[in-house]
Image (cartoon, rainbow, N blue to C red):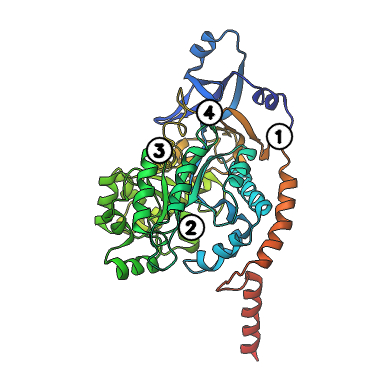
Amino acid sequence: MNQHTPLRDLLDSPGPLLLVPDAVLLPEGPATGHAVVVTAGVFTEVGPAGELIGRHPGTSPVRLPGHLLMPGFVDAHHHLTQSFGAALAFGEPSEIFRRVWVPLEGALDEESAYVAAKLAALEALRGGFTTVTDAGTRADVDVDVIAAATRDAGLRCVLGLVCNDRDGGAAPAGPGVLERAEKHLVRYEDDPLVHASLAVSIPEAATEETLRRTAALAAAAGAVVQIHVNEHLAAVERSLLTHGLRPLEHLHAIGALGPQLLAAHATLLTPRELTLLADTGTAVSYNPVASAWKGNAVAPATAMAERGIRFGLGTDGTRGDGFRLAEAAEFAQRIAYGLAGGDSSCGAGWTWLEHATRGGADAVGLGARTGTIAPGLAADFLLVDVTTPELALSHDLPWELVRRGNRDQITAVFVEGRLRMWCGGPVGWDGSALVRRAAALAEATVSRAAITRAHPTSARARAAVAGRERSTAR
């Protein structure tokens, strides 16, 4: 389909919309012959197409042959203001936040933070994400800049406010941090696309009092606290030396575990820590691409699924393609755990679709708002072309979406019932102009940031290898 078709105009109308695709992806699987009604940004009806058409004689059905209507992907872990330096992480050892992300975000001003966040939002929408969870920026700007960027892009955002109040020493809990947290939690109560969250970079970045208080505040507000937990060996060892406990155990000891906690990464877990997660209802963001690119381990997500531990899939800002994220989630489990145990399924396709959508929405505190095609929930969904060579010869669509799906097959992205992306381009604003502005700002930002990399660029590395080979040949 081209960029300007009568179908696009129909889908971009204020509604109500009666959409009749080839199939609708429900929790129990693809349902053929189904339709949905979208009114005022929510699904009002989902059911057999004939019944819905009969009940709405005044609404013209929008027929979508060759398309699957499915929930939008939920990115359970992102850093929106790090988009200017995405490739700076390639080939780097763990804990790069100290050498790359902190100085990069510290070099952002209000304009560059806005553009970086909107650039990340554009990539997310292109990849089928309708919700993104931002773990908080270190840029010295009001977080409303990030809210404005995602809102202007048309992306739903769980927006973290960093509540760190400790920098190496044993500083007391700062009342300013907690006051800002309380204000942040009510700031977006009436915003349809922005949902407040609290964040602590790592447990050692906040005092025990602040960790307890932010947990209580978030629980009372129905929000989540995002904390990077048990991600890298160095952090686990520091916690053992300081507290005699691993980071997750330490959070449990001070009363910070619970349904309000979204533990980012959680790659290094003992059997006891899996039990703690299950018993407390704590959620996890499983970030498989981040593990491959810059991690120490892969989170045991199949074990989490078996034990009923709540988790969603996160990109960690690596790449914004929901289908490739789901594929990476299954692939990483097969390589890290399945091959050794002879598990050729590793949860099968449905597990990863589930946690990329409904399970992710639950993990980030939005399970009652989005993540499923069901009456009363926000109309956050994708129209996926299933006539492509990868999907047309379907035998098991959930598996095929995980292993053979990609963002090129997404015809349309809807958030809160509005068409936000059509054939890879944003609706209502100029994506190309944003990319051009981002390229200019990124060059200036990276040049003034005190970034330290362990490895040269790939071109320089190749030149060094070629130089050594010539030297050996002599």
Residue toward you, 271 or 324: 271
- Left or right of 173, for residue 45: right
Q: Is residue 239 visible?
A: yes
Where is residue 6? Give x, y as percent: 72, 24
Identify the mark nearer the N-term, 3 or 1.
3
Q: The residue tagged with tag 4: helix, strand or loop?
A: loop
User: Which mark identifies residue 379?
Assistant: 4
Is residue 195 depicted above or below 333 in this figure? above
Crowd rating for badge 3 (residues with CA inside 10 Å; few <14, some 14–19, many 20+): some
User: What residue is disc 1 on?
Assistant: 428
**Which of these two is toward me, 297 or 154?**
154
Q: Nearer the viewer, mark 3 or mark 1?
A: 3
Secondary element at image label 3? helix
**x and y, in percent, of residue 159 in the image:** 51, 44
- Tag 4 and tag 2, C-beta contact below 8 Å: no
Dot in front, 2 or 3: 3
- Mark 2, secondary structure of its residue: helix
Q: Looking at the rendered structure, which numbered label has been put on residue 282?
A: none
Front of the two marks 1 and 2: 1
Query: Closer to us: mark 3 or mark 4?
Result: 3
Q: Amino acid at mark 1?
A: Gly
Look at label 4 and name its amino acid.
Ala
Q: Residues within 10 Å of mark 2 (few under 14, many from 20)?
A: many
> Label 3: which residue?
221
